Amino acid sequence: MRLTIVGCSGSYPGPDSPASCYLLEEERDGRTWRVLLDLGSGALGALHHYVDPLAVDAVLLSHLHADHCLDLCGYYVLRKYHPTGAQPRIPVWGPDGTAARMARAYDLPADPGMTAEFDFRTWDGVVEIGPFTVEPVQVEHPVPAYGVRVSAGGRTLAYTGDTGPCAALDDLARDVDLLLAEASFRTGDDNPPDLHLTGADGGDVATRAGARRLVLTHVPPWHDPAVALGEATAAYDGPVELARPGAVYDM
């Protein structure tokens, strides 16, 4: 299974990265299957550097904040009006209300909204997409939000999405090959509860859960990513690094 970082800026696109978007690829049956974890602000344009967006098989939305889902609007336009013709529907998994949220975002009537382009499905248990097995885990955030475990080819990745510290994260990250953990907050700041993780939180989860590698993401442009990295390194003895656009991880 291959992970490519398309966008990793926290809360909004930064000067060097779009907002959250992660491409997973795996071979099966003579072809490459591709899914996107989130499609946040600015990510669709950058996605063209790594793959034809029409070659994506599914989109998995962790939650419905703009920095994780809003470029689905541009993707709707691309799939509806592409010069080669309207493209086949692809599944989009997300929290309850995803179809209505995206229709409002593009000022479309709720019916049909984007349902001719996307087959909207609500997170409700394990999902199979080609070679990928996807397990959603509800986490703590001001809106319904999910982390996901994605397994393929004998390897497993866990993605926290956006979350405050919670017991569910240990199960999410248990024995994974790579933990992709948000690190929006700094330890010592007056951080609101149930909203985001610090680098130290990510390191603690990786240690408790036995994750074999930690990649920190979703650091907002107003913070120094080196602070998150330092916190995580102090809390976790395994390999840890900062996500960056274009980075590729083969698991």
Image (tube, rainbow, N blue to C red):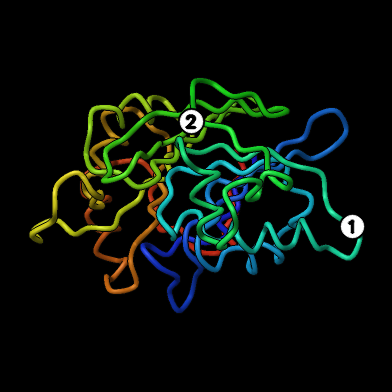
Q: Name the residue under label 1.
A: 85
Query: What residue is shown at x 40% (from left), y 68% (from top)?
Result: 12
Q: Where is residue 139 in the image (x, y as percent from the top left)?
A: 31, 35
Query: What residue is shown at x 30% (from left), y 54% (from top)?
Result: 183
Closer to the camera, 149 or 128?
Answer: 128
Query: What residue is shown at x 55% (from left), y 62% (from top)?
Result: 107
Helix, strand or loop at mark 2? strand
Q: Where is residue 157 in the image (x, y as percent from the top left)?
A: 50, 35
Vertical relation: 149 (above or below) 246: above
Residue 59 is left or right of residue 30, and the answer is left
Helix, strand or loop at mark 1? loop
Vertical relation: 155 (above or below) 239: above
Question: Could you give the CA–CA distance between mark 1 and mark 2, rounded to whole angstroms?
Answer: 34 Å
Vertical relation: 140 (above or below) 19: above
Q: Residue 149 carries which label?
A: 2
- For the C terminus, the image quarter is top right
Q: Where is residue 26 in the image (x, y as percent from the top left)?
A: 71, 37
Q: Earlier in the sequence, mark 1 or mark 2?
A: 1
**Crowd rating for badge 1 (residues with CA inside 10 Å; few <14, some 14–19, many 20+):** few
Q: In which quarter of the image is residue 119?
A: top right
